[in-house]
Image: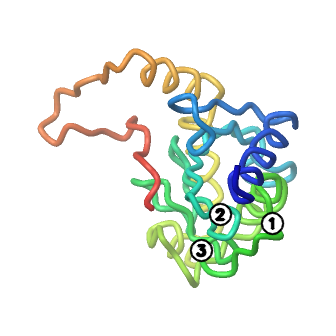
Amino acid sequence: MSSPSKRREMDVMKLMMSDYNVETINDGLNEFNVEFHGPKESLYEGGVWKIRVELPDAYPYKSPSIGFVNKIFHPNVDELSGSVCLDVINQSWSPMFDLLNVFEVFLPQLLLYPNPSDPLNGDAASLMIRDREKYDQKVKEYCERYARKENIMNSAAEEQSGEEDVSDDESGSSDNDIAGHVDP
């Protein structure tokens, strides 16, 4: 077994043995979902998100791809794809970091300190800059609507059954849809 694959195994096992609920996809260690709770004393407190993680073959030398599966209103998270704009993951990743860093430090910091000057969600960024009170209200509305434990359970059940609800509108989507896959 090569060093990167040993490290991948060790990091995933460490995450599984922590307080995080980890659900592997296709019985491998390269793709999995992690239940992530919004940080205390933040607008996201009480929210629960499913985070999709994909580890490249070169992990830990190449950063993991992470994305929110259920919707979140945040300037640095693409609302449709769930992709995250976070320098430490996208540009300055180091093999010294591990998966616990992502969930215990990087994602909580992202939610506690949004950066509207480098947005993936322009609407969230401009609202945050223009009217902080309305921004805070919308974050809380999204948490209530999309980031409840039931949302994660329902999306897990849909994934397992392989069935998707078909909406009646012509676009095939609605505000209740759960965001898609992680961008590579």
Q: Whole-percent x and y of residue 70?
A: 52, 41
8 or 92: nearer the viewer: 8
177 or 62: nearer the viewer: 62
**Figure check: 41 above or below 88:** above
Q: Mark 2 points at which residue?
A: 133
Q: Whole-percent x and y of residue 104?
A: 84, 54
Circle 2 packing at 10 Å, graded few (<14), some (14-19), many (20+), is: few
Residue type at numbered disc 2: Glu
Q: Residue 97 got which mark?
A: 1
Residue type at numbered disc 3: Asn
**Figure check: 105 above or below 88:** above
Figure colour scheme: rainbow
8 or 66: nearer the viewer: 8
Question: Taking 106 as reference, is 152 left or right?
Answer: left
Q: Which residue is drawn at 65% across and 77% down?
A: 87
CA distance for labels 3 and 2: 30 Å
Circle 3 packing at 10 Å, graded few (<14), some (14-19), many (20+), is: some
Q: Whole-percent x and y of residue 123?
A: 45, 68
Q: Which of marks 3 and 1 is in front?
A: 1
* Quarter holding residue 17: top right
- Give the quadrant of the C terminus: bottom left
Question: Which of the two discs, 1 and 2, labels the residue nearer the N terminus?
Answer: 1
Q: Whole-percent x and y of residue 160?
A: 45, 19
CA distance for labels 3 and 1: 13 Å
Question: Taking 15 as reference, is 158 left or right?
Answer: left
**Figure check: 138 above or below 35:** below
Residue type at numbered disc 1: Phe
Q: Residue furthest bottom?
A: 117
Whether residues under marks 3 and 2 lie with C-beta atoms below 8 angstroms apart, the answer is no
* Quarter holding residue 23: top right
Q: Residue 90 got which mark?
A: 3
